[in-house]
Amino acid sequence: PGVNHTVLFELAKALTVPRLFVQLLLALPRHLRRGELERLVEYVASETSPADVSFFLDVWWEVMKHKEEQEDGTASTFSALIRQHGSESSPDDGLQPPKRFKSDPVSVTGPPAAASLLVVLIEGLKQTYRSITLPRMRCYALANLAELLSVFTELEPEGRSLPVAEYLDKVSSVVSLWNSDAESRYHRRGLDEKVREAERSMSLLSVVKLSDEELFAGLDFLRTLLHAWGEELQGTLNNSEELCYESYRLLDTLTTLRKNLVCFSETRDLSEDEKSVVLELTQIIGDFLKKISTSLKSKDSDTSLVSSVAMTIIERKLDRHVEMCSVFASEQTWAFSKDWVDCLVKNKTLFQKPELVLKLLDTVVNFTVSSQDREARELQMQVTRAILECYTELSLTDKNEVLSGVLASWGGPGLSLNLQVVMEGFQEDLNVTFNQITQSVSDQGLSRAVASVARLTLLYPEATVKKVCNLAVVNLGTHQFLAQILCSFPALSFLETHDDPGRPRSLIVRCLKEAVWGKLSTAREEEQFLEFLAFLMQPSSAAPLVSPAEVTKAFILPCLKSDCAQIELSLQILSKVLGMQSYPEEHWIKSCYPFPLLLSLCKLLDGYTRYWHRPRDQHFPSLETKDLVVNTLSQLCEVVRPEAAPSPEVWVQSLAWLHRKLASLDWTVGLHLKKLYGDHFKNEVPETLFEICKLPEDEWTSRPLPAYGPGSGLLAWMECCCVSTALRETMLTLLTVNVDNPEEVNLFSKGFLVALIQVLPWCSLSEWKRLAHVVQSLLQRQVLHVPYTLEYVQYMPLLNLRPFAHYLQFSVLFLRGFQLLCSSSCSTWLPAEAWLHVVQLYCSSLTDLLGSIKSTTVPPVPPAEDMNPTQEVSFVCIQMFCHVLHVAAMLPDNGCGEPLVVVALEVLSQYEAFSAADMSPSNALRRANERHFLECITDNVGDKALRSTLLQKLSKLGA
């Protein structure tokens, strides 16, 4: 508009609106701005008054602080108007810049057009500096020039910003100076406006840079001013009682400029003249600052002002308010004032970050320790509630980060020890939450369950984990779901150090030990515990919470003693962890003392050789556990490979150590380690074994064993057959019996029966099944001679029994064995509790025998009479039934009858099935005769319960 510039300048000066003036100026097209600013400089330089200087310096300062997004409504409207009519300005409207700028080759839209404004300002100061006499204005002018040269040139290091604490301190210092300085135009403004303005002065945007030529011209001019004003200003500043804003800013900007100049001289390739200017100015600034009193170089703000400034920045979301939240959360001296609490509650959304939640928790805990009165408790509750709301809104990853921090700071108890207010109602909340979780187990409910547990875990991690562990064991079918919940918090893999920093232990493992270990009362609970533990070690879609090594050290190594009550469960756990795939290059077993672990298993295995002769009050794992020991030892031998040792020499030394330790154990134990030993050691066996086997001497060697005298070779051979399936097949292959020599066959068969009875009581089920296979193999090869007598045959059966010969021989071999075992010469050999085990093994073999018969001749059978084996099978069943009753009659009366009842009923059921399938004309008569015969045999059974049960079953046959 056609406005008189003198009126415009005087109006802006009188109203003290340099900021609006600059906004209007910078709303003009780029090519008009310099001319307008030059008009202002020309106006100020003519008949310069102190008010002119002040307004000029204010405009300069506003130009440097200007940000487009901070324009007010008037400036925005003016900008829109200029954009609308900017291209219509005529050459004589009074706004056209001087001719010399028309031919400027630089693009009118580029940064140099903006940079030229800075040059105009420096030129303006050159024209007016002689008129500046007031110390305050001189400080202002020097501060503007120093700030311009420091920020809007290549002197400013890239990407450097003040640490937030220093930033807050400077903003607070500025606000404090304005509060105490009645001459400042911000003195009467509110705190919000002062903080906003202080922030503007702290965050200058160097969108344009002066050229090197302009930079050195500016540095030279600054040197001139410092020479002219420096000494006088030093005296004035040192004599003044208190800083004003301008003097504070001068000292601050000169300090920054000096640092930048030092960095500039060290990192830039400068000419000699340039280097001289930089070094001289650096020296001048240093000398100037050195002579200023130390107390004037900083302005200490009181704590309440600093906290108020920080809260204002947060509440108004000013520059760097996000970083300010970090200071707010961790500054203990501000915490729990009314304003602090209100600020936190109103601005909760700004604190929804894991690091801020952690800092707030730390602040709350520290406050709680020092304040215990009722008002403090109410504040704690209010603040804690707000923090928990922030925590609830975090992602699961961020929640884990917070939980990690809580565990690192306060360990397993978490906040429970230091923040008693959160424990009010915690137990009830814990119970209600997990009642709901266990009643709605589903994949869809997992995320809700995790969210519910997250809060409890934060407040009292170990109590929450113990609750999960307990429920996983006692609540049927919930263990995997609960394990999934725990695995959602990888932070719980936290390692506690307690009193031994060198031996950290897992929080989860400790909770498992304290909550459930040693308290498992049923097999089902042990099974759920095992599966729960396995899931924690190898979850389907998360990181493991506990490692196999941690589990081994906690639940296995301390328990591998025969008198430990949890030894069976420990062995199951060891078998489970050994069966898990190990992905790391270095197997976890290396850290778990593998060779002592092997020795412990070997000692357990050795203990079974004295199983029936140990004191009755001495605890020892059952014979059912023997197979688990053997299998686990085999797994461990697979895992412990030469690579587990630090060097080949250590591997050989370890093997030698183990071999020496095994010398005092039963010789069969060493056979289980052949895969581990490799070629380092041969199989060591009794010398008598070589008498009945062709053992290759490069793999086998004899060992002096006094207990294995002449004739014990077959016993040693049979014990080898029990060790493993592979060794059993080797023994069968290497066995040497001359079948053409009747006497040798007879001797072998009698010795076999004796050896079988000697081995039987110490066999586990798997070992006994291996021996049963040996019997079948020798019968098929006709190496073992088992004559079949007709003691339970009334009439000569005119049947084809050849396909069933081995079944009959098998059954009668067992009968002969029991006859020997129950004879007067052996009657005191076994303790009473061993008989039940022997009977159970016998019954398991008969069950397998029945299954084998059934699988080869399943009714209904083919109709052709010559292919119908039902009569033969019925005959075999009758014979087996008689053999079972014979064995029952010989056994001592000590509660061994139940397994025999079960197997006898199985035999009768099979007899009934095949007998009913017989379609021959004489079937009815034959069945009546057989039934009568079976009833007569059963009538002679001495055990009343056994006799009654079997007669009841017989009465229903054919009914």
Image: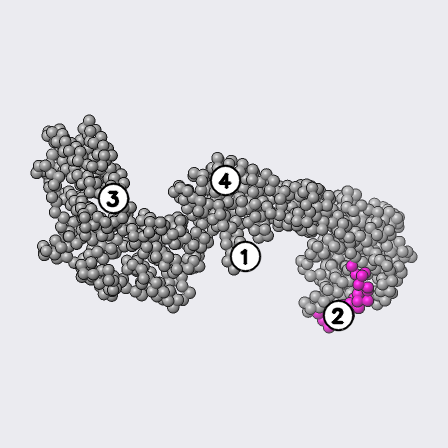
Is residue 281 magenta-colored?
Answer: yes
Task: Give the mark, 3 or 1, whose residue is nearer the N terminus.
Answer: 1
To which residue does mark 2 refer? 279
- Please tell me which of labels 4 and 1 falls first in the chain: 4
Answer few, some or many: residues within 10 Å of disc 4's Cα (few below 14, many 20 plus, some between 14 and 19).
some
- The answer to whether residue 129 is visible is no
- What is the distance, in whole Å, between disc 2 and disc 4 at their CAs? 68 Å
**Mark 2 / mark 4, whichever is N-terminal:** 2
Q: Secondary structure at mark 2?
A: helix
Q: Amino acid at mark 2?
A: Leu
Marks 2,3: beta carbons within 8 A: no
Q: Please give the residue where the numbered disc 3 appears in the rendered image.
A: 839
The disc labelled 1 sits on which kind of residue? Asp
- Left or right for 140, reference 360: right
Q: Secondary structure at mark 3?
A: helix
Q: Main secondary structure of the magenta part?
A: helix
| Kind of element beneath mark 1 | loop
- Of residue 483 and residue 25, the one placed in the foreground of this image is 483
Q: Nearer the viewer, mark 4 or mark 1?
A: 1
At 23% from the left edge and 32% from the top edge, which residue is drawn? 948
Residue annotated with mark 1: 499
Looking at the picture, does residue 746 appear above or below residue 950? Answer: below
Mark 1 touches mark 2? (CB < 8 Å): no
**Sequence order check: which comes first, mark 2 or mark 3?**
2
Q: Disc 3 marks which amino acid?
A: Val
Q: Earlier in the sequence, mark 4 or mark 3?
A: 4
* Residue 446 - label: 4
Q: Which residues are magenta?
A: 270-298
On screen, 333 above or below 843? below
Nearer to us: label 1 or label 2: 1
Q: CA distance from mark 3 to mark 1?
A: 54 Å
